[in-house]
Image (tube, rainbow, N blue to C red):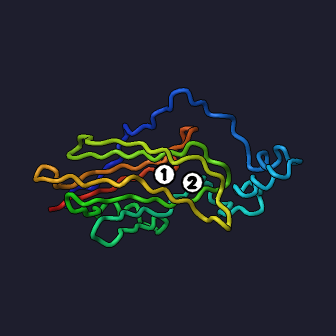
Amino acid sequence: MSKQPEIDQELVAEDTAGYKVTDKKTIAEYANLDAEDDSLKKWKESLGLSTGALIGDPNDKRRVVVLELRVDVEGADPIIINLETPGALQSLRKSPIVIRERSRYQRRLRFRVQHEIITGLKYLQSLKRSGIRVDKSQEVCGSYPPNTVDKPYYEKTFAEEEAPHGMLARGTYDVTSKFVDDDGVTHLEFAWQIEIKK
């Protein structure tokens, strides 16, 4: 069995040239903007900007709650990890997700936003083998209002990838996944492994 993966401390979000983060507003401030405009009011309510429809535990201070990691591998049952289960992140560090070489696979993440609007949420991923980074990616997820009873979570599906192949590509890769927003807040960071097999 391979050693447990470590968090890649050098995984940092890249800035988008020319993009400037705007001042933060509360849900109530957004809801009250142009309050006399009925069409804007309906549009804001459809986004969940009316404070009555919001979900989330007021005692849970997290703004982004990552609920589930799913890996769909061609020709195999989906691998679904409920990240809200106690010990799930520790278990994920110990048991690599096995992918056959040349298989097509796709990652999906399910998450909830609570308490306030999140702007510029990004998913960062680093892939290392024997301590050497072999890949780094950054995917912009978008901006999201808090979830509502009608829309209890968001899903992000990433581009389909093909597992590497050949004797040198087989083995265990350490993965660091990280959720960061425009304010530089890291909402979740965790280490896990992928094992490429013949």
**Depth check, front residue: 163 or 54:** 163
Identify which amino acid the numbered label 1 is placed on: Leu
Q: Which residue is mark 1?
A: 188
Secondary element at image label 2: strand
Q: Residue furthest right?
A: 36
Is the residue marked by circle 1 packed among few (<14), some (14-19), or many (20+) residues within 10 Å?
some
Q: Residue at x 79, y 56 (%)?
A: 42
**Depth check, front residue: 124 or 104:** 104
Where residue 20 appears, as percent x and y from the top left, is 60, 30
Q: Residue at x 71, y 61 (%)?
A: 54
Quarter residue 170 falls in: bottom left
Where residue 104 appears, as percent x and y from the top left, is 28, 59
Q: Is residue 136 left or right of residue 109?
A: left
Q: Where, quadrant-wise, is the N terminus in this rendering?
A: bottom left
Q: Is residue 130 left or right of residue 111?
A: left
**Depth check, front residue: 76 or 82:** 76
* Image mark for residue 54: none
Q: Which residue is mark 2?
A: 64
Give the mark nearest the N terminus, 1 or 2.
2
Is the residue marked by circle 2 packed among few (<14), some (14-19), or many (20+) residues within 10 Å?
many
Identify which amino acid the numbered label 2 is placed on: Val
Where residue 59 appears, as percent x and y from the top left, is 66, 60
